[in-house]
Image (spheres, grey):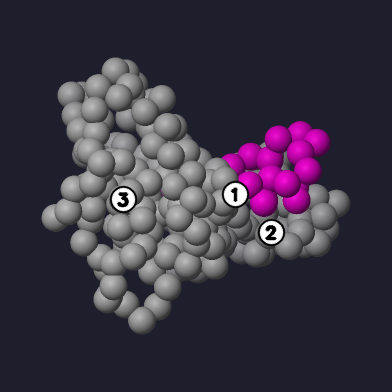
Amino acid sequence: METVGNLGEAVTKVLTKKGGAKFNQSVELIINVRDVDLSKPENRFTEVVELPHGLGSKPRRVAVIASGNLAYESSRSPYVDKVFERNEVEALIGNKKAAKKVAREYDYFLVEPSLVPVVARALGASLGPLGKAPIPIPPNQDINSLSSKYKKSVTVKMRKVPQVSCVIGEEGMKTSELLENAQTVLNRVVEKLDRKWQNVKSVYIKKTMGEPIKVMTR
């Protein structure tokens, strides 16, 4: 396993390594944490991080669950992959197979606040195991900008093991873009740690089918 001196060098090494897949591989960031007691709820977290440069040709799939004008505006947004109205969600109640399929198909579910209870009944049991949850749409929020944000976001979490891992883009992106995406995620994770950088054990960058490259940490 190769070790490099900094994050930028690691990203460059990953992108220039030959071999592997015949498809455009994702680039992943792995952060190992130390001296954190995960039996304490305050040390566990789940965060949505908006990546400055998105995810290249593999953006997140965003669904909106809404009614009336909000459903109409959502259907016009280029960042919304699917709009579900109330009757479509109610049809999923009690239909576990269909609910699981919908839960797997989309990464983020933006929900009109009045419909959150219905969504919880219809999809709650399917979303939970996937680490997903309905996201209430704030009042007077522009659905176009909100869905655009989630389109280029990733969810980072630390629950049972002292590690955070997520996709930060793909190999077709510029080195500078991947570096900024990686730094954004790393900074957010460090913010959540009690002793900040002292809790970071190691950081790795890798492609989907490539060997991880270790970044020197403090």
Identify the residue position indicated by label 1 in the image.
150
Measured as percent of width and height from the top left, residue 122 is found at: 54, 54
How many residues crowd around disc 1 within 10 Å: few (fewer than 14), some, or many (20 or more)? many
Q: Residue visible at 66% across and 64% down?
A: 82
Q: Is residue 149 magenta?
A: yes
* Foreground disc of the pair 2, 3: 3
Q: Amino acid at mark 2?
A: Tyr
The reply to whether residue 79 is visible in this rendering is yes
Outermost residue to the left: 1
Q: Is residue 99 magenta?
A: no
Measured as percent of width and height from the top left, residue 51 is found at: 53, 46
Q: Amino acid at mark 3?
A: Ala
Q: Is 64 located above or below residue 162 in the figure?
A: below
The reply to whether residue 162 is visible in this rendering is no
Instruction: Determine whether, in the image, residue 84 is placed left or right of residue 198.
Output: right
Occupied quadrant, residue 190:
top left
Identify the residue position indicated by label 3 in the image.
10
Q: Is 40 located above or below residue 107 in the figure?
A: above
Q: Amino acid at mark 1?
A: Tyr
Q: Is 103 located above or below residue 198 in the figure?
A: below
- Separation (CA) of disc 1 from disc 3: 27 Å
Q: Which mark is residue 79?
A: 2
Q: Earlier in the sequence, mark 1 or mark 3?
A: 3
Measured as percent of width and height from the top left, residue 129 is found at: 36, 51
Which span of residues is magenta-colored? 129-150
Q: Is 178 located above or below residue 7 in the figure?
A: below
Instruction: Determine whether, in the image, residue 15 is placed left or right of residue 54.
Output: left
Pointers 2 and 1 in contact (C-beta within 8 Å): yes
Measured as percent of width and height from the top left, residue 193 is found at: 33, 24
Secondary structure at numbered mark 1: helix
* Foreground disc of the pair 1, 3: 3
Q: Which mark is residue 167?
A: none
